[in-house]
Structures are given as structure tokens and as C-alpha cells.
Image: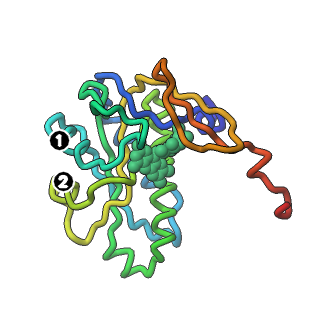
């Protein structure tokens, strides 16, 4: 798949096969994050790969919102949960020392995580970026020192769902139909694209 196809076929995946993700692929993702654009080349980010079976349910428990309102009431079946996580950390001490504005650091996080998402997707691995997590729980669980903040949690695994996108002019709420297919409404190109000047 070329880069455009990778970018447009990528969907957030939250249902996974019961198959582990090879560590080498996770490491490749982090290497791609390492080489992502960084404001002022300050590189205030570090990453923890979590793939130990014992830790996976504990990280999942630290995720506060998984699939929003489309989450089934009975919870997410253990076999279909993420098989690995990459926790992106912000070194807040280094950020301060190098005078990085928080909004620049947050852009760094987005760029690093998207690199990881696309590298994983190119290997057939789906992922879900998660911002609604319980930071205190994660810091305790993963021994994260005080000077670090959690910027993002990326949940990964081999996809066991095939979400579809559809164009929308109104609701942007994603939803699951009676066949279990997730529908992800996206604003239309003609509604968000401006050429030369805002029209
Ligand atoms: C910054 C950010 C934070 C997100 N946080 C969560 C989250 O906490 N839980 C979750 O289930 N999905 C989360 N997502 C995934 C979005 O819900 C998803 O990207 C959106 O529904 C669009 O679907 P798509 O990624 O397939 O295009 C997050 C995505 C982004 C970019």
C-alpha cells in the first residue's frame, strides 16, 4: 500500500484477534516515532512498550473511555482486547528546560503517534489512540517517574473488525450497526477544503 492508501484506509480498531503482536514491529513503531517531526527538534518524548500478558489487563483498566457510547454494557471480552500498548511519555522537565510550549509538545505527540499508527497498519496491525486514561494508575503500574506525563496510550493488535467510513453533513457520532460493523462518519472534503482563501 502506498502512503496515501495507508492514510485513507486506516481506521481506529478496538476489537482484536487473540494473537500477540511481534515485539519487533512494536519496536519499529517506536523507532518511527523517534524520527517523527519535533518542534525545535526538542524531542521531549519517550515511549513504553507494554506487551507482558500480566500487565495488559491492568493497562486496559486504566483506560477510562474505550469506544465511547458504543461500548457494550457487558464490557469488552478479554479475548478481543488490545494485545499491546505503546505509552507515549512527555518528559516535562526536559520540555521546560528546552523552553518548549505545551502546544508544540502536544503536536509532537500527535505526529509521533500517527507515525506509529501507520507503521503498524502497514504490517496489518490495527490500533486505537487513547487520551482518556487514568494517568495516576498508569504511572503507578508502569513505574513512570514524576517528571514524566503520559501524552497518549496507543492500543494495538491484529484487527477483528472492519469499520467503514461514510460522508456526513450532520452527525459525527460513530456507531455500531446490528451486524456489529462500526460506522465512522467523516466530514466531506468539499466542506473542509479551502483553496487559497477561506471561502
Ligand atoms: C487525540 C485522540 C484521542 C482519542 N481518545 C480515544 C479514547 O480515549 N478512547 C477511544 O476509544 N478512542 C479514542 N480516540 C479514537 C477516536 O475515537 C477515533 O479516531 C475517531 O472515532 C475516528 O475514527 P477513525 O480513527 O477510525 O477515523 C482518540 C483519537 C484521537 C485522535
**x%, y% of residue 17?**
34, 22
Can I make out residue 37 in this image?
Answer: yes
Reply above or below: 191 against 19: below
**Labels 2 & 1 near each other (Cβ < 8 A):** yes
User: CA gap, disc 2 to disc 1?
Assistant: 9 Å
Counting from the top left corner in percent of width and height, residue 44 is at 39, 67
Q: For the residue carrying disc 1, how many other residues have a C-alpha within 10 Å: few (<14), some (14-19), or many (20+)?
A: some
Q: Where's residue 94, x and y in %? A: 34, 75
Q: Secondary structure at mark 1?
A: loop
Describe the element under mark 2 as helix, strand or loop: loop
For the residue pair 82 and 188, the one nearer the viewer reads as 188
Q: Classify 34 as above or below 178.
A: below
Q: How busy is the neighbourhood of tag 2: few (under 14 within 10 Å), some, or many (20 plus)?
A: some
| Residue shown at the point (27%, 27%) measured from the top left | 77
User: In the rendered structure, which disc, 2 or 1, sits on the residue that comes first in sequence?
Assistant: 1
Position of the N terminus, as image quadrant, is: top right
Where on the picture, by quarter, is residue 69? top left
Q: Is residue 112 visible?
A: no
- The residue under the point 77% across, 52% down is 193
Q: 160 or 104, which is in the foreground?
A: 160
Is residue 73 rendered to the left or right of residue 144?
Answer: right
- Residue annotated with mark 1: 55
For the C terminus, the quadrant is bottom right
Where does label 2 land, which residue?
142
| Residue 20 appears left or right of 160 | left
Amino acid at each position: 500500500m502506498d502512503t496515501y492508501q495507508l492514510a485513507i484506509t486506516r481506521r481506529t480498531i478496538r476489537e482484536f484477534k487473540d494473537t500477540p503482536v511481534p515485539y519487533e514491529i512494536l519496536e519499529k513503531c517506536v523507532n518511527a516515532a523517534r524520527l517523527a517531526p519535533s518542534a525545535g527538534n526538542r524531542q521531549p518524548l519517550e515511549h513504553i512498550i507494554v506487551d507482558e500478558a500480566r500487565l495488559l489487563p491492568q493497562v486496559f483498566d486504566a483506560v477510562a473511555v474505550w469506544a465511547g457510547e458504543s461500548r457494550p454494557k457487558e464490557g469488552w471480552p478479554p479475548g478481543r482486547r488490545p494485545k499491546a500498548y505503546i505509552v507515549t511519555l512527555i518528559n516535562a522537565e526536559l520540555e521546560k528546560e528546552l523552553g518548549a510550549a505545551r502546544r508544540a509538545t502536544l503536536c509532537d505527540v500527535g505526529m509521533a503517534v500517527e507515525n506509529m499508527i501507520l507503521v503498524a497498519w502497514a504490517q496489518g496491525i490495527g490500533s486505537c489512540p487513547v487520551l482518556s486514561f487514568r494517568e495516576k494508575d498508569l504511572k503507578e503500574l508502569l513505574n513512570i517517574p514524576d517528571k514524566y506525563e503520559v501524552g497518549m496510550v496507543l492500543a494495538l493488535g491484529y484487527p477483528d473488525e472492519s469499520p467503514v467510513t461514510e460522508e456526513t453533513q450532520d452527525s459525527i457520532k460513530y456507531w455500531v450497526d446490528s451486524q456489529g460493523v462500526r460506522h465512522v462518519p467523516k466530514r466531506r472534503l468539499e466542506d473542509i477544503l479551502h483553496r487559497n482563501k477561506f471561502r
